[in-house]
Amino acid sequence: MKRTAAGMIGTLATFALLGAAFAQDLGPRVQKLAEGVYVHKGKGYDSNSGIILTQEGVVVIDTGQNPIESRSILETVKKLTSMPVRLVINTEPHADHSTGHYLFSPPAMVVAAAGAGDSMRGAQRAAPDRIQTLANSSPEMKAALEGYRFIPPHMEYRDRMRIDLGERTFELIYLKGVHSEADTAIWLPKERVLFSASAFVNEQVNIFRPFVNIQDMLAASRLMKALNPEHVVPGHGAPGTIKIFEDGEGYYALLVDRVGKLVREGKSLADIQKEVKMPEYPAWGSQDRMPTNIDAAYRMVIGK
Ligand SMILES: [Zn+2]
């Protein structure tokens, strides 16, 4: 068959249209940060996930807020490539980042910081009917949970680990005392993309557990800013830049200043809890976590 110029142009136009349709198919919640590097954004303050394509397969960072989200992440992967998911890297072991591992593993190996498996097993023991309760929440959730298995990490690292897969490098950096028992920032040095875990969340009040403190958070901020990332993907909240860390630093400086002033006036923690307000941050989500923030600031001020 003889191909005409018009036919060629028609074919090219068809490819262009297919390309555009392909891009749209990913939907508004999938954002491309660099060639082959995507974030599947959580709804509202739900957890974010990373999808990174390499010549040797896919790396998924965190497996979604819940199994419905996990299936959406898996669908996105399938739209992007037919290659298998080789690795799941966990920024933290909490359920809203790890329940969906069963959809990716096998074939994926799950990698996390030391202590992540113990944290997951502890949560499992504390709420043995968690998955059943989740399944009962809606028929969609029940369907999404089909094939569920508990998958703790296959590999845990201490302090730092470097993974080279295909053309990509992933630097896993343990962040001490910022959110869970095992927090990991994931740095892609060539692409200058940083998945910063839940040390700082975007426009949201963070939660302070007893082992989390402001000093460690500020240390994590300094460490991550020094990497000089172009994109920062927090565990929760919209992806952005190092402004996420700077906003957090400003917030903690103000909080510690206010709490410190009341401590010097001889006020008790109970009084300080009642008095300290942060009206500069009315739009930040999860305001109910404020008492844990004031508690952390108090611990920092009195040097505990
Ligand atoms: Zn968490």
Image: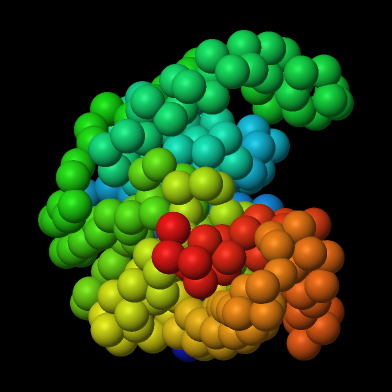
Judge whether residue 15 can be spotted in this image.
no
Q: On the image, which quarter does residue 112 sit in?
A: top left
Residue sitting at x 57%, y 54%:
208
Q: Nearer the viewer, residue 294 or 69?
A: 294
- Give the answer, above or below, for where 126 lies relative to 251: above
Q: Is residue 28 left or right of residue 219?
A: right
Q: Position of residue 279 (x, y in %)?
A: 82, 83
- Give the answer, above or below, for where 47 lies relative to 30: above
Residue sitting at x 49%, y 66%:
302
Residue sitting at x 19%, y 52%:
159
Q: On the image, which quarter does residue 147 sit in?
A: top right
Q: Nearer the viewer, residue 67 or 298?
A: 298
Q: Position of residue 261 (x, y in %)?
A: 64, 83
Q: Looking at this view, name the residue that lies furthest to the front.
A: 266
Q: Position of residue 4 (x, y in %)?
A: 48, 82
Q: Position of residue 233 (x, y in %)?
A: 49, 69
Judge whether residue 294 can be spotted in this image.
yes
Q: Quadrant of the N terminus?
A: bottom left
Q: Nearer the viewer, residue 212 or 55?
A: 212
Colour logic: rainbow
Residue sitting at x 28%, y 55%:
174
